Amino acid sequence: MSRVAFIGLGAMGAPMAVNLAAAGYQIAGFDASASARENVAGQGMKVCPTAEHATEGADVVVTMLQTGAQVLSVWEALLPRAVAALFIDCSTIDMASARRAHGLAQESGALSVDAPVSGGVVGAKAAKLTFMCGAEPKAFERAQPILKAMGARIIHCGGPGLGQAAKICNNLMLGAAMAATAEAFTLAETLGLSNQALFDVASVSSGQSWSLTSYCPVPGLVADSPANNDYRAGFQTKLMLKDLRLAETAAADSGLATPIASAAARLYSDYAIQGGEEKDFSGVIQAMRRRKGS
C-alpha cells in the first residue's frame, strides 16, 4: 500500500484520512491546528509536527485546505522536497489557484489532480463522498484507488482545473435551490399553507429537488435534516457563501453574468451576518422568516 501524507485534518479531512488508514494505507497527517492533530491521534495514522515531516517518504500527498492561497503555499513548500509522485487536492478553491497548483506539480515532475468533494461531513465519515476530478488521464487513473477509499463516486470531469469547475457549478445549483426552497416555505407559511401540505405536493411534483426531499429546511419533514437539530451544520453557511463567491468570480473572469448566484450569495451573507455563519446553510430560512416579520 502507498504511503500517504494528508495535510488538513479538519472536519472533512480528518474522517477522510481515517478512512484511508482503515483501507490499509500508511497515513502521516498534519494540520496547523494543534486541536485538529489531537483529534485524530490514535485513529490509525501517524500525526506529524509539520507538513514537511508528514511528506517524508510519501508516495502520495493529499491536501484538504480552506483557500487557494493555502493550497499553493503547501504545494510550493512540499513539491521540491517530496518524493511523492502524485499530489491530490480535495479543497474547494478558485480555478486560477487550482490551475497554478497543477502547473507547480508539472514543473516538479509530479502527477496532480484537483478533486473537490460533495457529500459533507456525513459523506466524509461514511466514505461516500463524490469526487469531481480535474486531471490528465494518467494522473486520474493513478489517483482512483486513493479516492475510492474515501468516496462512492469518482468522476473525471476533464483536464486540470475542471474538477473545481464542476464543484462550483454544482454548488451554485445547490445554493440557489435551497434558497428557493426556503423562500417557498416562508411564502407558504405567510399564505396559511402548512409545511406538510407544501412538502407533500412539491416532493412529488415539479418543485421536487434534493434540497427538499433530502435536506428540507423545515423541521420534522425529512429524517436527518439539519433542520431537526437546530441547523447544526452538515455544510456550513460560510462554506456555501464561499462557493457561491467562487462561482461569481469564475463567471466574471469568463465575462458571464450570474444574477441568480449573486442573489443567493446575498441571502446567505445576510444569514451569516445574523449569526448563521457556522450553522447549516439550510438555516437560511431563519433569515427569511425574520425578514417576513420585519
Image (spheres, helix red, strand yellow):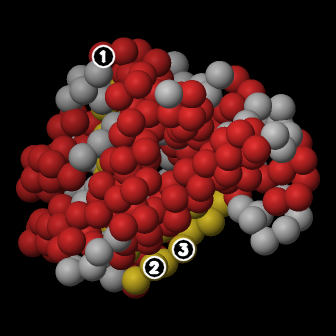
Q: Which residue type carries mark 2?
A: Cys
- C-alpha gap between disc 2 and disc 1: 35 Å
Q: Looking at the picture, how far across and down is residue 173, in whole percent? A: 52, 65
Q: Residue at x 40, y 62 (%)?
A: 261
Q: As rendered, which of 292 and 247 lies closer to the eye? A: 292
User: Dot 3: few (<14), some (14–19), or many (≥20) neighbours within 10 Å?
Assistant: some
Whether 146 is drawn above or below 63: the answer is below
Q: Which residue type carries mark 1?
A: Ala
Q: Residue at x 15, y 48 (%)?
A: 69
**Dot 2: element:** strand
Q: Residue at x 19, y 44 (%)?
A: 70
- C-alpha gap between disc 3 and disc 2: 6 Å
**Dot 3: element:** strand
Tell me the tag on residue 157: 2
Which of the two discs, 3 and 1, labels the residue nearer the N terminus? 1
Whether 205 is drawn above or below 240: the answer is below
Q: Check contact, mark 3 vs mark 2: CB within 8 A.
A: yes
Q: Which residue type carries mark 3?
A: Ile
